[in-house]
Amino acid sequence: MANPADELTPVLIPIHPEAVDGDGDTLRWAVPAATLGLVGVPSTVPAALQALLDERVLESVSIEPGAVRTTLATGQSWRDHGARVRAALQESLATPEQWTSSGPSSSADDLLRAVVRQVIDGEVGDYIRSHGGRVELIAVRDHDVEVELAGACAHCPASEFTLTRRIETGIRALYPALGRVTSRNGSEPHLSQRVLGWFPTRAG
Amino acid sequence: MSGHCQPTAASAGVENADVRLALVGSPNAGKTTLFNALTGLRAKTGNYPGVTVSRYEGACEIDGRSVVIEDLPGSYSLDPISPDEQVLAEVLDELHTDSQTPQGLLVTLDATTLPRSLRMLAQVVRTGLPVCVVLTFTDELTRRQGALDESALGRALGVPVVSVTSGQRRDLIALKELMVRPESWARPAVPPPAAAAEVSSWITSVLTSAGYRLPETDARTRRVDAVLLHPLWGTLVFFAVMVAFFQVIFTVAAPFQSAIEEFFAWLGRLAGTHISNGLVRSFVADALLGGVGGVLVFLPQIVLLFLMISLLEGTGYMARAAFLMDRVMSKAGLEGRAFVALLSSVACAVPGIMATRTLPSARDRIATMMGAPLMTCSARLPVYILLIGLVVDPDAGWGPFSAQGAVMFGLYIGGALSAMAAAWVFSRLGRSKGPLLPFYMEIPPYRIPSARSVALSVVDAAKTFLRKVGKIILVTTIALWVLLNLPAQSVADLQKAGVDPSDDSAVSAYVIDHSYAADVGHAVEPVFEPLGFDWRINVGVIASLSAREVFVATLGQVAAAENPDNPQTALKSMTVADGPRQGEPLFTPGVVAALLAFFLFALQCMSTIGAMRRESGSWRWPAIAFGYMFVLAWTMAWISRQVVEALV
Amino acid sequence: MSLMTMKPRERAVASTVPTPSPRCTTLADLPAGSTACILDVCDEAQPATARRLVDLGFAPGAQVSVVRRAPMADPVIFRVAGGELALRRCQARCINVRVEA
């Protein structure tokens, strides 16, 4: 149990590890959205995390929206190093400015693009696909997102509105600075079709 | 551990279980409801060795495999600060070989208070044993506008999560499928952290990922609490509830109790007409039937007490009553919940001692048990009435208050105050052995208790009483019968002594006068001589060990031998049989005061000792209680005699 | 008080409460209906008690509100970590908070 002295330490950034299916060496640490302003493999990380990479405890560290993935080097186990990785990550997240990326994906737009892709590939996208729909990213610009809805859902204005809201909520959870999300229909239907679309049709 | 526990036939079967699981969870998290739903009436109760902690174990069969479930004491932490929690920590510790470590742990988490319950879960997962989370009250979470994604919670925790709505059998199917193979449960690669700040971080992160939204405060609970916890109305309702509570154990039980007594008296008479040998007849009628009847006579009180306690607990009012009474009880070093146990003891100490089960801390349980027998129980009433009648004029009084009533009231107050004082002393003594337990009590929302849980708790209490306490009462009743009736007197002996063998009361008086008990009465005379007791009172005191009201009957028999037509007058005119005061009146005001004080303080009740043995798990505490109460009773009796004799 | 005993205590306070302000108080002194944020649990009486209070949800950073007091002002019901808990004032005094509303 905790040393009572721990009670004096400041409130830490909330993190927890989740297993990654089919890859026992990698853990996905959920971190609050927008803690780190970048995605991909960082070129520099804070000293605590770098030490684990230098000691060949960790093979790699990569950032995705709302999470940090850590992969063990061969021959290492979470049982031995899990607590240390947690502590190092917790400490490193307190200094987000020390995480840098020299690669091409370092702008805010790139981060937002990664977030949108994750949402589209994730639960929200699954829901739309399960209803015969399709959603694609058109563009990101200054915190705004434009997506294209196509397929079965696109014909119904009501569903278009709800779906856009759902996508927006999904993105905002991982990218709080999000501006607007606009959607357009993949195949702009005629007015008559839009009206007909409100009624049940015989043909599937 | 099983090697130490009650060696019943059933526990031998329990050893050979295919899967052994334990239920862990905080109090009020629906742990016992789940246990009952899984095991039903097949649960075995016992005690953990050496501690006042009840042990519940039950079996169920799933897919042809036997699964044994142990219901571990409820706790908010694995960091033990009380014996109950020590038990929990030891069972979960694989290195602790005294206890059989379960193969998997079912952890019940109240979905409405997840931020708190995840703290305990973090500690449980860190033990390294396979863990399966059972979410309870998810229906209440939805009703109070909370939200939770169960599969996301399972992913974030890294352990299986199933939800069980209380009392729904079909919810158990998913859980039962998991229960048979704890070795296949998912385990997190990295266990939750240990340091408080890191745990807070982990909990926040897990709950965010699981889309958790805290439920709104229960509107119904808030409205009811505005009245029931109101400084004025709340206190009034509390006293009304307690008066009703007391009335039920005291008066509603009475007709049932007298029906049981009459039934056994009838059986005794039946035995009397069919058995010719006087000694055998007396043994069957007085010892056997008297003993069994003496056990069963408590049953109505115990059933009613536990019916009301489980209703009060199940609805959530018990926590409120304890909250209102806590300030008063803290003066006795106890907490609010001890009030119910002490109040029940005014009817009878046996249900009172059994009610200490509701106290979460073992130290409070012992302290309350040590004080409870001092409360004026209903068995003291006939003794008090007889003794007060001997010395206090029934016509004396002040206005509407009779002197007899005032003395009686004083005895009740004296009992209550000394019970509180004894509890205070014992909680103080207990305190030196460990850190002071912090007082904290969950105030659960008001809920409707399930009829099944209420019924099971009543049946469990009745079963435990009959099996464990009943045995002790029966054995002591038989032992006392032997003391009071042997050696057997033949008709020739009686005639030689000038006793008419056809006069039953004369015979029984003669038998008592020449029994082993009389020998004991003579032998202990030096002890009781300073109190003014002669050997006949001593015999009555010894006989009253089976139950206090027996004192009245025994003295009655002794007196009847001297004046069969009017025993009351005979008692009044009795003189000291031997010793320096020979020939002087026996029942002087001083001696009666000494007797009253003696009966107020002495633990003269084998049933209470039996209940104490059962609830504390060893003979140690009943022995201590008997010892301290005897010393106290003797001292107070001596002081009373001196004071009264100086005044009169 | 000697310099030796002063120093560690000053350091402890400095590390806990960087800017002592009138808004920092203990849980026992909060009026009914108010809400506060827990700063820390002091282990003045018993480390075990402090640990248990944290396990009950009175952890640094947690939100706590005072629901109501018993008729004689003790104990007090608090709402913390999603549930309601009654504490005696002597324990509530061990919990340092910053008043929020």
Image (spheres, coloured by chain):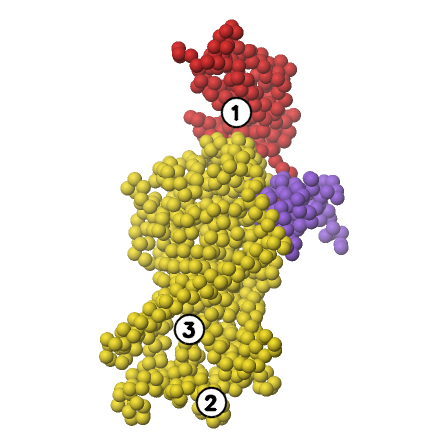
Q: Which chain carries label 1?
A: A
Q: Colour of chain A?
A: red
Question: Residue at (51%, 74%) from the top-left corner?
Answer: B600
Q: Position of residue B614 (x, y in %)?
A: 41, 63
The chain coloured yellow carries which letter?
B
Q: Is residue B543 left or right of residue B317?
A: left
Q: Which amino acid does label 2 sit on?
A: Ser
* Residue underneath mark 3: B547
Say how many tags the image has.
3
Q: Which amino acid does label 1 sit on?
A: Ser
Q: In which quarter of the image is the C terminus of chain B?
A: bottom right
Q: Nearer the viewer, mark 3 or mark 2?
A: 2
Q: In which quarter of the image is the N terminus of chain B?
A: bottom left
Question: Residue at (73%, 47%) from the top-left corner?
Answer: C10
The one nearer the camera, A176 or A163, is A163
Q: Which of marks 3 and 2 is nearer the N terminus?
A: 3
Identify whether A25 is placed above or below B218. above
Q: Within 10 Å of the Cα at label 2, are there few (<14), some (14-19), or many (20+) other Cα atoms?
A: some
Mark 3 to mark 2 CA distance (whole Å): 26 Å
Q: Mark 2 lies on which chain?
A: B
Q: Colour of chain C?
A: purple
Mark 3 to mark 1 CA distance (whole Å): 78 Å
Question: Residue at (64%, 15%) from the top-left corner?
Answer: A142
Q: Is residue B466 left or right of residue B589?
A: left
Identify whether C73 is placed above or below B388. above
Q: What residue type is labelled 3?
A: Ala
Q: Which of marks 1 and 2 is in front?
A: 2
Q: Position of residue B364 (x, y in %)?
A: 52, 60
Q: Position of residue B123 (x, y in %)?
A: 50, 43
* Residue underneath mark 2: B573
Q: Within 10 Å of the Cα at label 3, are there few (<14), some (14-19), or many (20+) other Cα atoms?
A: many
Question: Residue at (31%, 86%) from the top-left corner?
Answer: B503
